[in-house]
Image: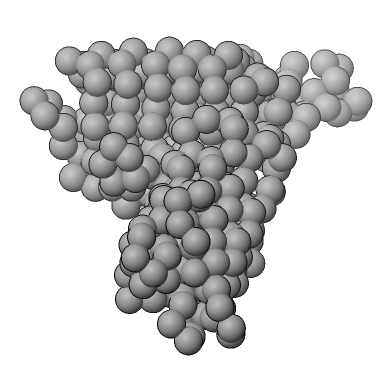
Amino acid sequence: MIVVVGMASACRLQLQESFTCTGNASCGGGGTCETNGFCSFQDSTCPSGRRFGDLGGAGQCVDGLPPDARPPDVPPDARVCFGTAPFTICFTAPPTGTIDVSMPTTFDTVTGTVTGTQLNCATPTSGGDGYCVLAANTITISSPLRAIGTKPLVLVAVDSISVPMPIDVSSHRMPAESSGAGADPSIGCGSGTPAALANGTGGGGAGGSSMGTGGSGGNGGGVNGGAGGVHAGAPGFGNVIRGGCPGQDGAGSNKGAHGHGGGAVFLIAGNSITVGGTINAGGEGGAPGTDNNSGGGGGGAGGMIGFDAMTITVTGTLIANGGGGAEGSGNNTAGLPGADSDSTIAAKGGGNQTNGGDGGNGSAGAANGPGMIGADGGGGGGGGGGAGLIKGPPASLGSNVSPAGTP
């Protein structure tokens, strides 16, 4: 079962002066979160060597302000914020209780419903627009959690988040097609140049681009066959938590469909995050051309995985690779689909089934890696999906991470 106890998400007016830190990370570079909830910074003119910042402690020396003191302009209902800008989620009071996902669960970030119970998306006072925020004092993922829906999933814990079991926000074609939470965002993805049909053969679709570019599609075979799609530029993720971008469809009367981008999940805790399971935000493989020399679909780009806490320990696996591009079809035979991204190894492009072009492999390994270009053939092969983003201190993310972590 899923246990949800005493979550707080009420909204009240907050002022900038009411900032309360929840850990050193929320104070920014060089800051220390003192016991009274205010940030201090080095200052050699203070006897203690530290002075409170302007948003709390009224700029006084740390040794000159009692531990439980609050300046008179700070209201008693001061907001509580978690995470480092630009990924800061604020409430009017610290979330309480526990969330324990204790049975295998598929959670929809839009409807919030699961069989037999319900996880509730909180309503933060700021920073939560467009996301499904699950908030509590502690959060434990003790059984596999699958998140779908158009909104990215954000976990916020006052104390700690423990992930001994998998969190899956990937998009996948097998065993049944499903898009991860926040995949294929409506804003931020370029379209590139689509694949074309010419002289009876279709080009393959390009892979999706996110942190890294997708591979372009292969050309259709024969004389002056249809041109393969050209990937869009890599838009990155900027200041938004969102999933990866989709690939392109192939061209032709029996073209292969694009792969969806991977989804997005961001974990924020006041103290610690521990991950022993797998967190997967990989892209979906493209679908193959099925007949009449049609192009294969491009793989989806990897999505986004993020961490923010004072202590982060990852012994599990983190995946935000691109999906593989699909094989183009021959005149009378179908190609093979591209593989979904489900490991730190590159998702393979479909191939060796027809005289259509093979699909390109999805990105894997290096940060900002591009997907591979699809091959030419009867129907052109689709390009592999580009890299997603894994955001957090690289030294804390372990060795089973692809692409490489980004601070």
Q: Where is residue 30 drawn, in percent x and y?
A: 78, 29
Residue lying at 46% horizontally and 75% vertically, measured from the top left: 202
Q: Is residue 395 left or right of residue 87?
A: right
Residue located farthest toward the left when viewing the structure as drawn: 116
Can residue 307 be seen?
Answer: no
Q: Where is residue 139 drawn, in percent x and y?
A: 37, 19
| The N terminus, quarter of image | top left
Residue located farthest toward the right when viewing the structure as drawn: 44
Q: Nearer the viewer, residue 310 or 13?
A: 310
Residue 311, quarter of picture: top right
| Rendered position, 45 above or below 125 | above
Q: Which of 345 and 77 is in front in this view?
A: 345
Residue lying at 25% horizontally and 14% vertically, measured from the top left: 102
Residue 79, quarter of picture: top left
Q: Which of 150 and 311 is in front in this view?
A: 150
* Numbered marks: total: 0
| Rendered position, 22 above or below 11 | above
Q: Which of 183 and 28 is in front in this view?
A: 183
Residue lying at 23% horizontally and 16% vertically, measured from the top left: 103
Q: Where is residue 185 drawn, in percent x and y?
A: 42, 59
Q: Where is residue 58 drawn, in percent x and y?
A: 66, 35
Residue lying at 8% horizontally and 25% vertically, measured from the top left: 116
| The C terminus, quarter of image | top right
